[in-house]
Amino acid sequence: MHIIKISKVLLPSYRYLPERLKMLFLFIGVFPQDYYTPISKIILMLKAEGLWGNWDCLRELAIDYSLVLCSMKSVNKNINKKYIGEFKTCRLHSSWQHVCRVEASKCKFYHVLNKLIDAKEEVLKGQRGLCLENNILFSTKEFCNSVRLNCSFSTRSLLFYWPYHQYPISIDVSFRLIREIDALKLRFYTFPDEILSLVQLKYLALTCNGEVPATISKLFNLRALIIHPSYVPIEIWDMQELQHIEILGKSLVAPPHVASLKNLKTLVGVNASICTISELLRRIPNIRKFGIQIELMPNEDHRHLLSCFGCISTLESLKILKFSITNPVVNHGNVFLVTRGSLKLPQGLEKFHLSGMGFPWEYMDVVGSLPYLRVLKLRSYAFQGSHWETQQGRFGSLKFLLMEESDLVQWKPGYGSFARLSYLSMKHCYKLKEIGMPAFLDQRGCNPLALTWADQLRPSVGSTLRVIAFSSFYNKPTTFKSESADDEEENNDIEEIIDCPMKCLVVWADER
């Protein structure tokens, strides 16, 4: 009841919003309460509806009007939130969400269905979108009849946002003009054939244990396909409008005939082998985000992985690369030959995630020379070896660095390297003893103990440095926190945390 009262107070603020912002604001309210929705998903769905304008609208809602609660990406968490491109997810306060849902239902934008009483004729009639938050509604004949009679021809989006349901539920898909279906919270044992008749569909997200039929190519208007975790047929290469494909842990086989998806911008979650990846990459020339998993065969030579990166390096439009080995094997010794030009990467790469490769640290010179690289995440022994010495001036644009599970003992950044690094996270690096401080932190000394080293950190001129270090090397798990500025004023706070026996080090620097 208190939410309704607060919403009445907030309603005038919504009505004063410029018309260009209202539809976007209402749309964000459709997602579940207290759930941070990826901005990339919001954009995909709005494009399917033909409602996406540009980043400025979201920036105005989040910053100028302070109506949308946004979480920052790991890069620049503490900077002035000026650029909306730094936001990763967003949500609405529960009071604002109530306002959005009531107003959206009044203007027939979408209607949220939680109880049978929500399916009244006067409310359902003419609704453009339906959002279901109760998994038993479609099992009632009264509800299905009401939906079919009142909004089957007007509905363009069908969203299922109730808690994940592990048992299959029958759904009446009688919406011939529907453009988007978000049903990841549902589970289908077999692909629902009714969907194949929805030729206007542009966004499809569902969880399906069975194989996707070859006839999915009938959905020639489809732009975003998110399937967990079903096999995708080869006929998908005939769907020329596709811009986004997400298939977790499944293969995407290249066709024997000449075919390509020139509009495809995102391909993530795909499984591939070393011998098939080159053929796959030739069919997606304009890809911007590529996430791939490779499972090595028992006797397969790790060194053949370098040929995969040779193929990837030809993708001139690639900005984000996520490359992981699903069954990494830690080899103590030189698996890869350290030769000049062995590792090749696209020069336009901005974000690079690597897991399980076991490359020697010498290969990092290639990564460090990438001119636009801002984010680097290394997991599961992506690089192996006890010593890493960074060359002078490398990683000039890097802002975020994560190292998780590494046998690194000593790290010596070269002079002028990591000049823009603002966030450093090191987790499960149990052997780490020494870090020679890079120049940007104005510290050249090092200390064998991470906590002592963290206490000695000093920021560069005009910056504030915050340090959080968790350690369980000692008998009692300890959290260390400190803050210092270039005038050497610092505030140290050490507190004991009994139930948090983690080993990691997190560092970030803020421009003032």
Image: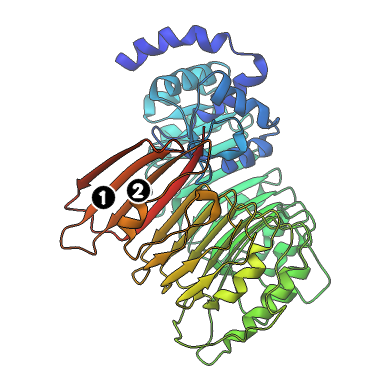
Disc 1 marks a residue whose amino acid type is Thr
**Residue at point 16%, 58% (across, down):** 476
Q: Quadrant of residue 109?
A: top right
Colour scheme of the picture: rainbow
Question: Dot 1: few (<14), some (14–19), or many (≥20) neighbours within 10 Å?
Answer: many
83 to the left or right of 161: right
Q: Quadrant of residue 309?
A: bottom right
Q: Nearer the viewer, residue 311 or 365?
A: 365
**Residue at point 23%, 58% (across, down):** 501
Q: Nearer the viewer, residue 279 or 368?
A: 368
Verify CB contact (< 8 Å) between mark 1 and mark 2: yes
Q: Which residue is mark 2?
A: 468
Q: Is residue 298 above or below residue 504?
A: below
Numbered-mark total: 2
Q: Quadrant of the N terminus?
A: top left
User: Is residue 254 among the parts visible in the rendering?
Assistant: no
Disc 2 marks a residue whose amino acid type is Ile
Q: Residue 201 location, x and y as percent?
A: 67, 44
**Pointer 1 or 2: first along the chain:** 2
292 to the left or right of 490: right
Q: Residue 62 location, x and y as percent?
A: 54, 26
Q: Nearer the viewer, residue 363 or 353?
A: 363
Q: Is residue 303 above or below residue 260?
A: below
Q: Residue 390 location, x and y as percent?
A: 57, 67
Q: Quadrant of residue 288?
A: bottom right
Q: Which mark, residue 97?
A: none
Q: Quote the CA–CA distance across marks 1 and 2.
A: 7 Å
Q: Is residue 75 above or below residue 156?
A: below
Q: Nearer the viewer, residue 175 or 67?
A: 67
Q: Residue furthest bottom?
A: 299
**Residue at point 71%, 56% (across, down):** 371
